[in-house]
Image: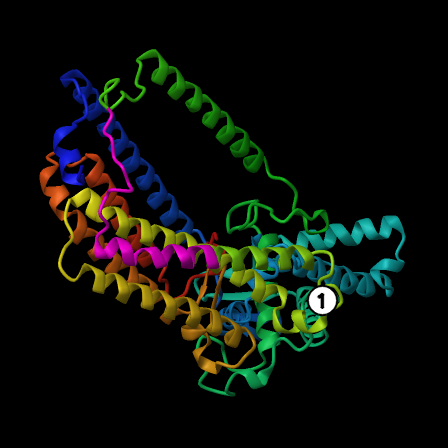
Amino acid sequence: MSHMEVHRSVRPNMRPGRQTTNSFLKSILIFTIVISFTVLLVGGYWIFKEMAPRPKEVRSESGEVLMTKETIIGGQAVFQKYGLMDYGTVLGHGSYMGPDYTAEALKIYTEGMQDYKAKERYHEPFADLTADEKTIIREQVIKEMRKNRYNPVTDVLVLTDAQVYGLEKVRDYYRDVFTNGDGWGLKKGLIKESDMPKSGRAWVADGDQIKQIADFFFWTAWLSSTPRLGDHITYTNNWPYYEDAGNTMSFSAVWWSGASVTILILFIGIILYVFHRYQLSMQEAYTEGKFPVIDLRRQPLTPSQVKAGKYFVVVAALFFVQAMFGALLAHYYTEPDSFFGIKWIHDLLPFNIAKGYHLQLAIFWIATAWLGMGIFIAPLVGGQEPKKQGLLVDLLFWALVVLVAGSMIGQWLGVNGYLGNEWFLFGHQGWEYIELGRVWQIILVVGMLLWLFIVFRGVKRGLKQESDKGGLIHLLFYSAIAVPVLLHLRVLYRTGYELYDG
């Protein structure tokens, strides 16, 4: 029995009353989606409006320019360029092999201020003070840190002398870390000035890269310990927790955490009650004894379905390699600088590169499986094989091969400093889950659009035959559209790290 014969001879048993119920449920679904996305968009706009400032200039009390907006953004670019989000975290976003650089910088910055105040008042380091003297210094430091000296009119942030001293301590610490390694999984000499031209740099500002990344970390420490203008909690709602900087759990954080969990549980209960009370469970599509019989052994394969087979071979290969990188990462947590004593493996594939590969390969094999399945079921749903469909399937496959190989090579070259100004385009973008360079990301989007075109050609006839715009075939096609749309939204030129949530 052919597919078209099955499609015509066996139809679901759907009562008119049930169709009315389904239409009502679809309306509820659409309403819920619209409301949810409205809340997300409004909330996103509010977050964007209330984000922490990246001041045009950061000055000392004497007027010396300590850093600029360009160097802060440049420091973020250095962080991204070397794939450090796949090693540590900033503002809690990233990987947990390395430290959270915000929390680490905040600790160094605070301790620097404490030392400055201790020497100024008692002529001794903070560590040598008595308990009472330490308490006095801690209170002074907290009071000074939690005064926001940013002027939104001039777009200038002024640091006190103690804060400047804390900044210098942060710079000294990270110069040592990125020169000599962190004694854990970060290799020595990761950031080198020779990796970038001296001037005319792309994304990274001119000047010392290590100083820029240290200033970026300091800026995140400043915004995490400084209250918003006119408020008593910081730009990060007093995160990370650190009592010496005055960062303790705020009432609003406790309140909204409790309220959100309570509301979630309440609405789950309401949904389950309504679902069972009004018997909204799915109706069987076919009555007993009238299920369609499809013998796949006798089902003829179209050329595009045959060509889709190699996609699933690639899926298996990518999954295996991804799992091997997962095993390597698991080992690095116990032996961060080698693999069972084999140093060259870590030198070739340090944690940040291996983590980027692990994440990207997962995305690639899942996407490839999605592509292959869409190609395979399209003629089954549409009931026909469009002309030249097999050629398009082959074209998409080889584009996928170029994408996977090119992006993997580019990430390694970018993190190791071989791409210069082209690091963002062909190397490592620096964002977790979208590590691949911008050019590879664009190729991915174009490939998904080609796949959407292939699927549309295959299901076009089925779409015409299905009168219900909310029917299964239409929903299948809507989901196919959503995939490239999602990828389009991820093609961002640049964004502030405080807005990113990986």
Left/right placement of residue 414 relative to residue 191 reads left
Please state the horizontal and vertical placement of residue 391, each as a whole percent of the image. Answer: 21, 65
Q: Residue furthest front?
A: 298
| Residue 441 is one of the magenta-drawn residues | no
Label 1 secondary element: loop
Please state the horizontal and vertical placement of residue 325, each as a whole percent of the image. Answer: 58, 59
**Which residues are drawn in magenta?**
291-317
In front of the other: 258 or 228: 258
Q: How busy is the neighbourhood of tag 1: few (under 14 within 10 Å), some, or many (20 plus)?
A: some
Does residue 52 show up? Answer: no
The residue wearing badge 1 is: 338
Quadrant in which residue 496 is drawn: bottom left
Quadrant in which residue 495 is drawn: bottom left
In front of the other: 139 or 448: 448
Quadrant in which residue 166 is drawn: bottom right
Left/right placement of residue 184 relative to residue 436 reads right
Does residue 131 show up? Answer: yes
| Residue 292 is one of the magenta-drawn residues | yes
Q: Amino acid at mark 1?
A: Ser
Q: How many marks?
A: 1
